[in-house]
Image (tube, helix red, strand yellow):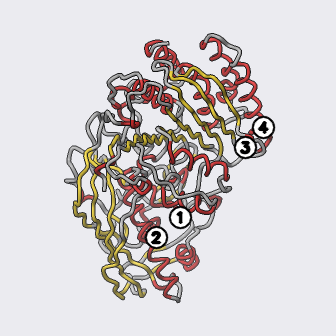
Amino acid sequence: MNFRNHFVYLLIFFLKTGVFNTAFSQTISGNPVGCHNTQGVLTTEKMTGKILLNKNFLPTDLNGIKKIQDEAIEVQIKHLMGLLKNSSTSNLNAALSAYRGELKILETQNLKYGSSFIIDSYLPTSRGNPSSSYTQMALNRGFVKATDDALLIQYQIELLIADCSPLKYNSYDKILLPYDPYLSLWLEDKSKRKPREFGPEKISAISDCSSNEIVLFGNADVSWFFWDPKCQLESSKVYKPDFKLIKKIVSSNVLDKSFFNKNKNKNKKASFSAVFGIVNQSDFFHENKFEKIKSFTFETLNACKNKKIVSECLPLWDGILGAQENNKYYEPGAYNFFLFLKYINTLVKIESIEHLDESKNQNEIILKIKGQLIDSITPVDIAVYFGKTTLDYGPKVSSNYLRFLHNAFSDNDVISYVGHAGLGQNLKMSVLNKLWQQEKLAPISRQTPLWLGIYNCEAFSYFGFDLNTIFKNKFLNVFLTETSGTESGAKFPLAQLSLLNMYHSHQEVRVKDVMGRYVQSREFLTMMNLKDSK
């Protein structure tokens, strides 16, 4: 089958799943996450900031104070992430990476808190209590006073920002961050709160310093995610951080000819891993839902083995996809997993599908697929994982999943990740290295290139720069393509698999041009060669 034929199958898939309705897709708050058909500029910035901590809510020991201090700095930086995501007035179309460079404490001062305001529980109590002892103590007290003793800590840290703005950071002066990042929910005077609604939820009185989604999702722990200071605040409550440009990196739209370390041997084996994470975890494992998914998966895969014509296999998946549309059994992660398996036959001539035995008694599915890329006749090994992928909350990820990722990052050509972003943590090397060490897995050190695709909400929080820690040669090509949204996420790994097929067919490959057939331009954030990142 040539590229034109399997492109028709994929086109049908994208039309059915509503992909082309996302041509003007935006984040919920209204800021487009994408570079609008322009090359994005990645900048390393040194930010000088300040945090203000009320001593009434601090521990008495120095170690405890340092822990709160470091945590508060991170929470304040996340307010910058929220502001860039939410603000429709700053003229910034930019995104902050989860990468953090070296943190330096420049100065610590003892002074007075400087502002007074009420601290009350005005968000629904069903959303839980704050996990921070600082915030909980503030809620218990119910107020802060300008005369309270406080610590003012000035710090400096290196950050990475993707800039898609035509103003090129000319509006940095519009960035405002809360001095006390733990208490940003309460900075606006209580008398100025207004009724607001979002979706099915309505709150009778809420601050105007946050985006509308806070009505539906917000709590004290993640107030930074909704930070959008349209409200008028005194200078004692917010400040303008200072930014100093360290380095610019222009993102790339072209696959280098040495990508995938290709040689003259046309039969060089390609390797591809796809991860589909469970999106809605709260009730997914109830009522034997996972067992139904496993049963249908293996019944359908076995039936597909006997189909000589690719198109005859595709309808076999319609029953399960229809169940998803009716919300009978499944959720977005499972839906994307099934869509990928449905259309993989249009890109790969499958020779065998093996189910990893170790996962049979787990709430996960691991498949090993062997075959040939249809256009190039190149042998390909495809590993597919479906299960829990979130590292920072809920049940722990399985040892099988950690080994799956370890194998993928060790030597695979391509990795497609469709699951929760974890605000940059779920594929962060420093986090994974600790977990791999607990599993007694050897440190990864590879010399072959990798193309990593991350497709999920808030994918912009991970730019992949820490991937350089697993490469011996920093000049090897590493590409990262990011987008936002979990709906119809199967289109992205299929697009990457199509690109892999084209590459091995010796076709000229431009990532932006080819991915643009499957992914709308506004869904791109970065496509970059990381060889110049550090």
Q: Nearer the viewer, mark 4 or mark 3?
A: 3
Q: Report the amino acid beneath label 4.
A: Glu
Residue behind mark 4: 291
Q: Residues within 10 Å of mark 1 (few under 14, many from 20)?
A: many
| Res. 239 mark | none
The residue located at (43%, 24%) in the rendering is 266
Relative to 315, 517 lies left or right: left
Q: Nearer the viewer, mark 3 or mark 1?
A: 3
Q: Report the amino acid beneath label 2.
A: Leu
In space, the residues marked 2 and 4 are separated at their CA atoms by: 44 Å
Q: Compared to 419, does 394 lie above or below?
A: below
Contact flag, marks 1 and 4 (Cβ < 8 Å): no
Residue behind mark 1: 220
- Residue 501 is situated, as x and y percent measured from the top left of the image, at 45, 25
Q: Nearer the viewer, residue 10 or 353?
A: 353
In space, the residues marked 4 and 3 are separated at their CA atoms by: 12 Å
Q: Secondary structure at mark 3?
A: helix
Residue 240's image quarter? bottom left
- Residue 297 is situated, as x and y percent measured from the top left of the image, at 71, 29
Please report whichever mark, 1 or 2, sits nearer to the chain's N-terminal start: 2
